[in-house]
Amino acid sequence: MNAYPIGMFPATFIGGATGLWKIDRCAAVAGEPLPAAERLEIRDGIVTTSGGVWRLAGVAGHTRYVERGEKARLDAVTPTLGRPEATRAALIPIRKSPAWWALTQDERRAIFEQRSHHIADSMPYLPRIARRLYHARDLGQPFDFVTWFEFAPAHAGAFEDLVAMLRAREEWTFVDREIDVRLSR
Amino acid sequence: MNAYPIGMFPATFIGGATGLWKIDRCAAVAGEPLPAAERLEIRDGIVTTSGGVWRLAGVAGHTRYVERGEKARLDAVTPTLGRPEATRAALIPIRKSPAWWALTQDERRAIFEQRSHHIADSMPYLPRIARRLYHARDLGQPFDFVTWFEFAPAHAGAFEDLVAMLRAREEWTFVDREIDVRLSR
């Protein structure tokens, strides 16, 4: 039943004893934590059979809030994943509250961009920080979104500024569970 | 991995030899048809193990294009599923083209409502026709959406008008696979 078309990127993040990425820390920012794991493996596809201490799946695909002008500006400065110098990463799964999901599209967009400036204020951090957003809500996952970030050690400070900025905004008052996993390879 | 929160409705539509609903006809409007089946069973949840000739899963949840004013007007006239007199049904799975999914949110909304009037022109058919939209794209299903409709035999003509109207609009030029399954109980 799982055949994804071109342009969609299903992935499963498996915390356990193996994988390219070493988990340096794993902190619960809000809500229930994840169990401790040493390494992270990233598998293509929605993997339900593998082991691991925890397993988070999601699908990257079409954008849900971005408008054409924003996409043009983003595309011009968005780096690819897998740059050799990007040896630091973060995996940040979040869940938003029932109140968020009860909002209509225009209300969510207004909080996301007009009032929280999620896109506009993230733009200056590009192309230093590569990012891919996986959607997980329709999959019945414990989180609604899983975002994967990659950056060089020299840009670790910029990454801290980016997450601190996002967490301080109105949009983040709707986040009721968030884990911050930091990694290196 | 599949635990859906309150307010989400995962379902699997199973075409086969059993089920409450009798399949009266099953026509491919665009693209590849579905194999013939006699009856339809609707199961709660994403069911991957059952038999059946075909199986379509989706998740009903938050709205993707509806704005607050539209939702208020819709809620006021939206009937529930399962009305005793609603002994006719339609199951219409559709897939939209890669060109649709490459559009940004503002572009998709403009086609959906400003130019195709999907919401405004469907409203007059309520409360005669009950409807639930299941999202399937993130699940890697063969269709992006599965819509379930229920109505009384007296409103079968109105239902034909509704689907003919939607199919004649610009939004539908992006539909590259569509099946129209009609049912009775």
Image (spheres, coloured by chain):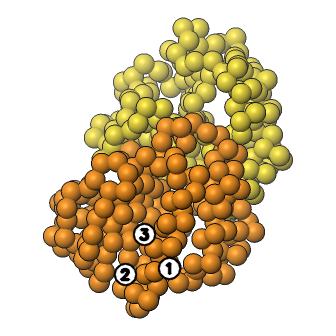
Chain colours: A orange, B yellow
| 1 and 3 marks on the same chain | yes
Q: Please tell me whether mark 2 sits on a helix, a strand or a loop.
A: strand
Q: Residue furthest bottom?
A: A85
Q: Residue at x 47, y 76 (%)?
A: A159
Q: Residue at x 46, y 61 (%)?
A: A134
Q: Please tell me whether mark 1 sits on a helix, a strand or a loop.
A: helix
Q: Position of residue B81 (x, y in %)?
A: 55, 19
Q: Residue at x 75, y 69 (%)?
A: A69
Question: Relative to B163, does residue A56 appear above or below in the rendering?
Answer: below
The chain containing the residue under callout 1 comes to A
Disc 3 target residue: A148
Disc 1 target residue: A158
> Which residue type carries mark 3?
Trp
Q: Earlier in the sequence, mark 2 or mark 3?
A: 2
Mark 1–mark 3 distance (CA, rounded to whole Å): 16 Å
Question: Relative to A170, does residue A70 appear above or below in the rendering?
Answer: below
